[in-house]
Amino acid sequence: MENFISLSPASKKIIKVIQLSASLNVNSMILGPIGVGKKLLANKISSKALKFDIKELEEFLISKKLNLDEYSEIIVFNIDQALNPLELMGKLSSLKVIATAQYVPTSLDQHFAVKIEIPPLKDREEDLEELIRKYEDEVSLLIDYKQKHKDIEYDLSSNAVSLKRSIFKAYLIDDIVNDDIEDVVYNYVLKRLDDDDVTYKELLATLETSLLKAVSYKYKSQLQISNKLKINRITLRKRLEKYL
Amino acid sequence: MKNIYKDMIMKDLNPFLLFDSDGKLVDYNTSAEFLLNDITIEELYSLALTYASKSYGINNQYVELKYPNDSYYAVSIGYIDDMNIALRLFKTIEQNQIKDLQGDKSIYQTEDFKDVNLFSLIDISKSSTLLQSNLKIIEDYDISIPEIKLKINSFILLLNSCFSHFKDHELLTIIIRIKLGEYQMIDNKRHGIISCQLQSNQDIDTNSLVEQKAIDANVNLFSTKKSLILEFPMFIA
């Protein structure tokens, strides 16, 4: 199982609270935006607890397929998406509940004595650096790159989720060869063909947009582009106007 | 004939105090004696001057006052000449009296009360509530306090509310003690009292929400300008 990286002062404090929560028989709610490590921390409070996403749990409880009497602890992911939070807590009243959420639903405030708010990665500098190192190590197992990428635009909009994606994407793009592009395009087209209203024009536009963006970035004038790509200038202008 | 008016005042459940024009205490009843354990004569005289009517007469004022042992909902201040001024305080009926029995069990024997280490609760509440605060905390604990029985969930919720008052402060001192020589009788059994004082160097502003949480947790809560004090019986595990 992955470990929650706790090198920043804020994360060290969080780990301390998590350890205390594990030793006490009280409900805990772990709060924060997507990708800050809520699930990892919930598992740290109790590794032996039942684990459910809220939707899955609600379905089980409605269908009465789950006998809660056999358990003492439960982890509920995304409890803020519960259809009826109070009814849910009534059904879980005999258990120690560890929940994750992006915000505290007002009706649940009194049911969770311990609330642990995880700050976003951008506010945890030391954790961010370590995560970047970790994801680059993971990439190196997949791709045999010669040197580290220096110009990655780290995407922190969804914290670790988008960060990992941006790192993997940067290295994969570097590593890609003609055959890979053909495979990617092939798979992309196959997927798009499932859409009812997809047209040849639309598919071509997707590919042509990337091509035009790249050449416009590389060459300053349309004259240079038309010379390089051996394309008529009038045609080029029309394509640029259409797609960019 | 004995003076029935004076007798009634002297044995009244509400404190009554009479000051001279210099603020010296001239007379007071039995209830006022207890009140003087919590607040000084100077503070009470200042209270009388604050709420006295502009001219001779008696002024009744509804005002919430909280002191360590009692709280009051109104004061009555009267003066008919320049020689004396009288102050009477009206006690609030405590909603937070711990009932002796819940069915055939003492309250602390019910399922709501669980054995717990008090310091763990303080620690978890303090750490989670003040996670992103730069508050400097000084801890002064009587570590001889054993595991006790508390309503854990309600108690942490109360602590969370209390700690949140200090989020933007610079310094907080937490003092936890067993009150010497003070006991609370519950179900004919004598229980020591634990005092948990949260003392800041800045003013705090409490709200009624905290008071409701204190009632839920069976804790007596009172505040001063810069501190919150929680007192509760020490139900030994």
Image (spheres, coloured by chain):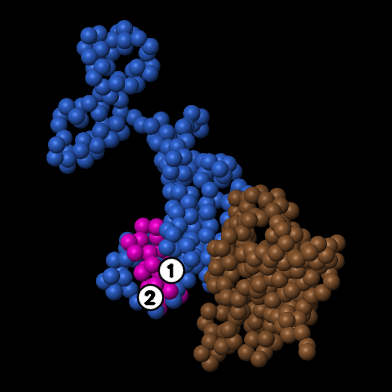
| Amino acid marked by disc 1 | Ile
* Left or right relative to A33: residue A225: left
Which quadrant of the figure contains the C terminus of chain B? bottom right
Residue A132 visible? The answer is: yes
**Mark 2 nearby-residue class (10 Å; few <14, some 14–19, many ≥20):** some
For label 1, the residue is A74
Marker count (numbered): 2
Residue B100 position, x and y percent, is 59, 87
**Mark 1 nearby-residue class (10 Å; few <14, some 14–19, many ≥20):** many
The stretch of residues the image draws in magenta is A70-93
Q: Secondary structure at mark 2?
A: helix
Mark 2 vs mark 1: which is more N-terminal? 2
Chain B rendered in what hue? Answer: brown
Residue A154 position, x and y percent, is 47, 35
* Left or right relative to A124: residue A64: left
Q: Hey, which quadrant is residue A179 in on the image?
A: top left
For label 2, the residue is A68
Q: Secondary structure at mark 1?
A: strand
